Image (cartoon, rainbow, N blue to C red):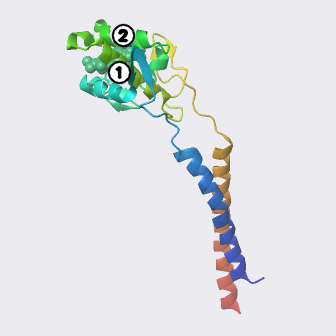
Amino acid sequence: MNNNRLILIGLLIPAILMIPFSIISFYTDFANRNPDPLSVTVDFDQNAYNAVEGKKAFEQYQCMDCHTIVGNGAYFAPDLTTVYKRIGENDAALSNFILSGASAKGMQPMRDRGMTEDDAYRITAFLKYANMLDTNGWPGAGSWERDGNPDSTSAKKLDFFDIWQVVSGIVFINVLIFAIILAYENKKNDREA
Ligand code: HEC
């Protein structure tokens, strides 16, 4: 077999391999694994408030002047991405905390800013949604401690498809190097001939 054909095969193998791996990575990395925010609701007083109205209220009361959501916002107060879980996935407890605050620690009672109970439950729906976001394990275990209780979210473990993406990358780079060396050898042989 001549070298040019070998090089072609060497390049075609990874090219063909990349197709199924690209499809796999598309489904595992980019598929929307987050819930529809309209379908995430919290019940209060015979109403079901969804995460979309909750986000509006969250913005209206400028929670991000002090807090962050997935790391975005102000760094005065704790990140709220997984606070729903931290507070025990208890809608009433979270809503009441938002209304009553923790003045001594810098969290203003939102009641003082004219917040209604309905708005507090709306925001709770938004925080419930935030807790369901696929953040790839962020924040990791122990990244947030409150009263000595580390956040128990564990970092994401490697799964089967992650491993295959790595393997396909390694195969691709190896075959590429192989093809470059062959091309170089080929040139050298031509010159010597
Ligand atoms: C003026 C700054 C400020 C604003 C504005 C603010 N917070 Fe806070 N918040 C804090 C601070 C500081 C804490 C931490 C209190 C503590 O250590 O107990 C906190 C704590 C919290 C907690 C408990 C966090 C935890 O991990 O246990 C929740 C929930 C919360 N805030 C929600 C909100 C919501 C919702 C809004 C908007 C309606 C908001 N906060 C607006 C300062 C603020």
Mark 1 sits on what residue?
Answer: 123
Of residues 139 and 126, the one nearer the viewer is: 126
Residue 63 percent coordinates (x, y): 29, 23
> Is residue 106 in view?
no
**Disc 1, ligand 1: is the CB inside 8 Å?**
yes
Is residue 30 shown above or below 177? above
If the picture is divided into quarters, which one holds ligand 1? top left
The 10 Å Cα crowd at callout 1, few under 14, some 14 to 19, many 20 or more, is many
Disc marking residue 65: none
User: Which amino acid is tagged 1?
Assistant: Ile
Give the total number of marks visible in the rendering.
2
Q: Quadrant of the N terminus?
A: bottom right
Of residues 24 and 163, the one nearer the viewer is: 24
Residue 57 percent coordinates (x, y): 29, 24
Is residue 82 shown above or below 22? above
User: Which amino acid is tagged 2?
Assistant: Phe
Name the side, left or right, on which 174 lies relative to 99: right
> Is residue 18 in view?
yes
Residue name at image x 21 percent, y 13 percent: 114
How far, Cα to Cα, is label 1 from label 2?
11 Å
SS of the residue at dot 1?
helix
* Figure quadrant of residue 40: top left
Residue 146 percent coordinates (x, y): 44, 14
Is residue 182 shown above or below 157? below
Residue at the extreme left of the image, as rendered: 113
**Disc 2, ligand 1: is the CB inside 8 Å?**
yes
Residue name at image x 43 percent, y 14 percent: 91
Residue name at image x 22 percent, y 10 percent: 112
Mark 2 sits on what residue?
Answer: 97
Residue 166 percent coordinates (x, y): 64, 50
